[in-house]
Image (tube, rainbow, N blue to C red):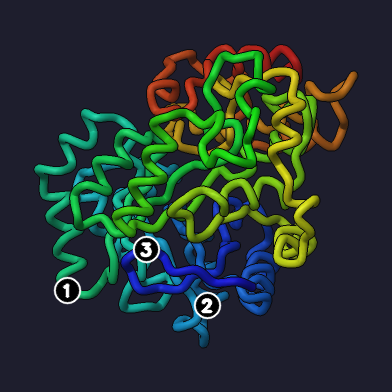
Amino acid sequence: MNYRNLGKTGLKVSEIGFGGEWLERHDEEESVELLRYAGEKGINIIDCWMPDPKSRDIIGKAMKGNREKWIVQGHIGSTYQNGQYVRTRDMKHVVPAFEDILKRMDTDHIDLGMIHYIDAQEDWDRCMGTDYIKYVHKLHDEGVIRHIGLSTHNPRIAKQAVETGFVEMILFSINPAFDMRPATEDLDSMFEGYDKADYCGIDPERAALYRLCEEKNVGITVMKGFFGGRLFDEKASPFGTAFTPVQCIHYALTRPGVSSILCGYDTKEQVDEALSYETATEDEKDYASVIAKAPLHSYTGQCTYCGHCKPCPMNIDIAMVNKFYDLAVQQDTVPESVRSHYEALGATASACIGCKSCESRCPFGVAIADRMQRTKELFGV
């Protein structure tokens, strides 16, 4: 495993990290074992934006006896209310949610205290002058969080965070689909001379952000590196062609300022597949030739199953409904395994009341209400 400096924090992080988003989907013992396995393989950084007790308990149990070996990204403002994730700046929820991380992980500090998920300018402006940001600084001053970070999908918000001087690292969504200019059909010309120009084909604002992070020594950890797994399937990929995990990892790690890509894992085999990057050949890492041959590109409106659409008034797990829909439509008929998993959800798409409150929280412009209707028609429930 290679380790990189995380910007000005002084921390050395494994260049391949652990995104804990789906830990709660598995048996607790299985997830604890998976996380310990990753640690044994040299992975030392994990992101915990998830507020649910099960995910936090799993991480705590996996780190027991080895807390000092792990670098934890713990989010401030990600809360659990009535059994659902709720992003909030309301201190009556923010404080107990953060204290819950410390308790469940049996630790007296969080290495990277993350200002949780700011994408809108209005949210940024509101946060910067409230008790919420004062609480973040208080935690930092007391050593409860060792370094201040921020998570966002918006390069403009990330740029403002870097320029504050107090944000030491950014959790940012990076993959080939997000970085390319949208709505172009001429990717060959975009990537002419890609081996001679660092930013050829990349949206200028995102390219400028990566340069700024490198200049200011603000480290980047990467989320959404696999685009929710879509990049591995040519039918689902916005490029119309498939990438490998190694190619996606290499893409992220070659952006200026990037220290680690936080991959999601369901199995030990997936951990091993990601770690194969460390011994991969240059040909195996080559992503640019794949993009240059791609027939199309559009990523807007596609679900990455991130879960930021919650809370739902009908308690629908929107991310999982979308995931089962996407799996189903790739087949001529709905696979029985997919159907059984879908029907086992506590609330299916038929429970959707079309309020569209989820759509205002989606970072990727997904027409969720329409997808719920299509999913109901597809599965019949």
Q: Are marks 1 and 3 in contact (CB under 8 Å)?
A: no
Residue 270: % across, % down = 75, 58
> Residue tagged by mark 1?
142
- What residue lies at 55% left-to-right and 55% top-to-bottom? 261
When the figure is inspected, residue 191 is found, relative to residue 297, above or below; the finding is: below
The N terminus - image quarter: bottom right
Count of marks placed on residues: 3
Q: Residue furthest right?
A: 332
Residue 53 visible in image = yes
| Residue marked by disc 2 | 63
Q: Residue at x 38, y 49 (%)?
A: 80
What amino acid does circle 1 point to?
Answer: Glu
Q: Please say if 181 is above or below 142.
A: above
Say which residue label 3 marks: 7
Q: Amino acid at mark 3?
A: Gly
Please provide percent x and percent y for residue 247.
71, 47
Q: Nearer the viewer, mark 2 or mark 1?
A: 1
Residue 157 in the figure: left or right of residue 133: right
Which one is closest to the eye, mark 1 or mark 3? 3
Is residue 146 depicted above or below 342 in this figure? below
Q: Residue at x 42, y 29 (%)?
A: 204
Compare marks 3 and 2 and give the one earlier in the sequence.
3
Q: Secondary structure at mark 3?
A: helix
Q: Secondary structure at mark 1?
A: loop
